[in-house]
Amino acid sequence: MSASALVIVAVGSLVAASCALVGSFLVLRKMALLGDAISHAVLPGIVIAFLISGGRSTVSMMIGATALGVLTVFLVELSYRTRRLKEDASIGVVFPALFALGVLLISRYASAVDLDLDCVLYGEIAYAPLDVLTWGDLSLGPRALWLTGFVFLLNLSLVTLFYKELKITTFDTQLAATLGFAPTLVHYLLMSLVSVTVVGSFESVGAILVVAMLVVPPSAAYLLTQRLSTLLFLAVGLGVASALFGYLLARTLDASIAGGMAVMSGLIFLACFCFAPRHGLLARWLRHRRLGRRLAEQLLMLHLPKAGELGWELLDQRFRWAPGRLRAIARRLQERGWVEPGEAGLRLTAEGVRRLEAAGQQPLRHPLGEAPLGDSTAGAGPAPASP
């Protein structure tokens, strides 16, 4: 891999890791859409900072973006607290208005400079190795690498320093307030970090693709663990993997590098969604299948009398299962020694009776259709099986 490729992968990895650190808390707080809103709403802050400073200073743009990010959160919460709008509607009202304001400011005051919508929305990470930071006559390396590295270290330092505060305010705001923490202050600190992360990634992957890094790797990590510390490590790891394999995908297809990274993050999420050990679709299907088998086995045993046997024809009429399922269930129970074949059907073994009684269940006192007249259990059937 060439030096330019290493710079591109490093910048993409730093962006993904920075977004994963703050995006994990957005996902846990059910505020993933707010990250999307901030990534667009900071645009007027960038333009205003450019107009005031007269240049594309990174520090001034970060200050402007952070201010607009905090303003976005404040306006969303202000409209939500009126109880006239739900939170998603509040976000949908605020961020398009601020984003449109930024578009108007660019078209009116910054149309003649290199501050266009393509730069803000899409970015171009392939040019990252060409923009070199200099100190006098000394070349310090790619500017994007320094900027994204600074944002990553900032996020990592603040998340580590305020880990306890972020954790308790994320999972129990009322408890945090009772213990003397400041949930509102921590909340705005997190939103400020999101704003800084977004504007620090504009020139590399663009605002739209930052949203993917903010939400997708943390969401994939959320499917893999239930511990916050592990979730953060996994989110960063999955984000870095998205950057690396996304670059290889884009290089293979000769396509957009930032787009390849976002697509790869989506593919990684899809793999986690399907194959996560506890919350994946396959794991859930296997659990439901095992549960269905256990319930069917217990139901069959409950329909067998304590003494005597029950014929296959009567069992088929009773359950109306798919052909072969009754025999397959009976075969599994027979392998465990809980039932055994009789002359024309099935009967419980002594071990099967003990198994039912240990579970708090009682087998039928008489075979189905043979209960004496007046027996209240004749038409009612057995008690339903407990899961």
Image (cartoon, helix red, strand yellow):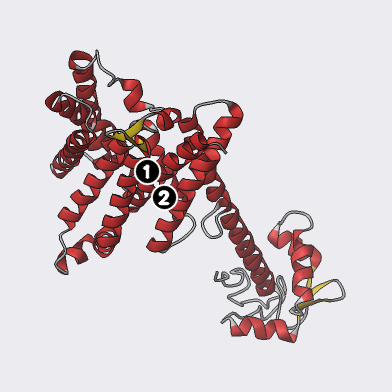
For the point 59% across and 79% down, the residue is: 361
Left or right? Give the position of 387 relative to 90: right
Name above or below for residue 288 compared with residue 256. Answer: below
| Residue 218 image label | 2
Q: Residue 340's image quarter?
A: bottom right
Name above or below for residue 262 compared with residue 160. Answer: above
Figure label count: 2
Question: Which amino acid does the dot numbered 2 rest on?
Answer: Pro
Q: Residues within 10 Å of mark 2 (few under 14, many from 20)?
A: many
Left or right? Give the position of 227 relative to 181: right
Question: Which amino acid does the dot numbered 1 rest on?
Answer: Leu
Residue 197 rendering spot, x and y as whole percentages: 30, 42
Name above or below for residue 295 compared with residue 144. Answer: below
For the point 30% across and 20% down, the residue is: 116
Q: For marks 1 and 2, give the CA distance.
A: 7 Å
Residue 25 rendering spot, x and y as whole percentages: 32, 53
Of the 4 image quadrants, the one containing the N terminus is: top right
Residue 268 seen in this snapshot? yes
Q: For numbered disc 2, what is the local secondary structure? A: helix
Q: Residues within 10 Å of mark 1 (few under 14, many from 20)?
A: many
Q: Nearer the viewer, residue 305 or 156?
A: 156
For the point 45% across and 46% down, the residue is: 239
Q: For numbered disc 1, what is the local secondary structure? A: helix
Which residue is under mark 1?
A: 214
Residue 263 seen in this snapshot? no
Q: Residue 222's image quarter?
A: bottom left
Q: Disc 1, disc 2: CB below 8 Å?
A: yes
